[in-house]
Amino acid sequence: MTEHGQHEHSHGHADGHADGHGGHSTHGHAHTTDAELADTLELDALILGSYLMDATAWAAQLLPEAPATIIDVGAGSGAGTLALARRFPKAQLTALDKSAEMLDRTLDAAANSGFGPRTTSLRADLDCGWPASAAADLFWASSSLHELADPEKTMSEMFAALNPGGVLLVLEMDALPSFLPETLAQDSAVEPGMEGRLHEALAARGWNHYPDWTAGLEGAGFAVERRHFPTEGSTTPELAARYGRAFLGRMASALEGSASPADLASLALLLGDGPESLERRGDLVVRGHRTGWAARKL
Ligand SMILES: C[S@@+](CC[C@H](N)C(=O)[O-])C[C@H]1O[C@@H](n2cnc3c(N)ncnc32)[C@H](O)[C@@H]1O
């Protein structure tokens, strides 16, 4: 452990506290674990991961040359780390996260994909300051900036640490992933519009809450471009149901009575084992849109 709460880390031990996919760590995540979050993130990347190809290509276009060093900031279970390793076959990658369990998942995934020799991890809590040793040509921060206590301060620290000519690529979900079609079957007992209302209830608890990062990034010194990545997942009904169960299950724990009884009853139908369950209904459509900010240090 160094003065900033960092650990150089290869394969550490789980520290098992709660955080949010698109949420803020201090709001309403008390009953979900890093392992559940990691499962959700992996299914998200599997089903909605086309933005990873698009956003890594965007970074490649903006960099003056292929990056030698990359840091995945708030790497989670490593979806970004793997996509970056594929896009930039010569780069050395560092997965940075405050969670040892997440870093273990990322290192395992990198090793299983043949990227082990190019991937290391750095355990650090960015709320304690940017790690002194963490410089690179490309920083990648996907669904992580909004979890920080003082994102503007971290953006300034990242600007200072980024190599000249480098890029910070920030990604956020525009809305939480959704699973039901716009129109439900007439005899469905699920309340129409319940997903949107549950998302609003979660937003009130801080889930996926973030501003347009443009002003903050420009204030830190970056030249900024913004882009939208719409994604409708094409997947099998089985995988859609697995992702739905992982995500809606986390939602149900976080909501804990803070939505209408009718909407919570609908959620229980989806998570139950009756004919309206995720596995048996057969009408799931997974959607998840993202916005990206490419911030250059000119
Ligand atoms: C919602 S996950 C996103 C993971 C991954 N980037 C993705 O898009 O799939 C956010 C990650 O940021 C990490 N994180 C949150 N606050 C952090 C902090 N203060 N310092 C370092 N990592 C942090 C969490 O542990 C978690 O793995």
Image: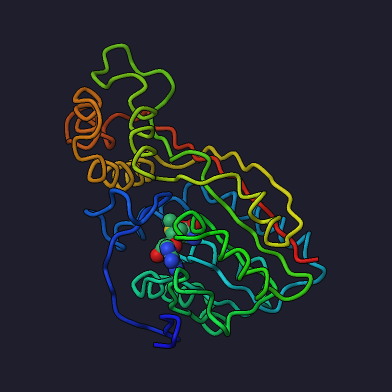
Residue 245 point in image, percent of width and height: 29, 43
Q: Is residue 293 visible?
A: yes
139 sits left or right of 58 in the view = left
Q: Quadrant of residue 289?
A: top right
Q: Quadrant of the N terminus?
A: bottom left
Q: Quadrant of the C terminus?
A: bottom right
Residue 191 point in image, percent of width and height: 29, 20
Residue at 76%, 57% in the rendered image: 223
Indicate which quadrant contains ligand 1. bottom left
40 sits left or right of 260 in the view = right
Relative to 237, say whether 23 is above or below.
Answer: below
Residue at 26%, 13% in the rendered image: 187
Residue at 43%, 40% in the rendered image: 177
Along the line of sight, the residue nearer the viewer: 136 or 78: 136
Relative to 59, say whether 207 is above or below.
Answer: above
Residue at 66%, 49% in the rendered image: 214
Along the line of sight, the residue nearer the viewer: 255 or 176: 255
Residue 29 point in image, percent of width and height: 28, 52
Q: Is residue 77 visible?
A: no
Residue 290 point in image, percent of width and height: 56, 44
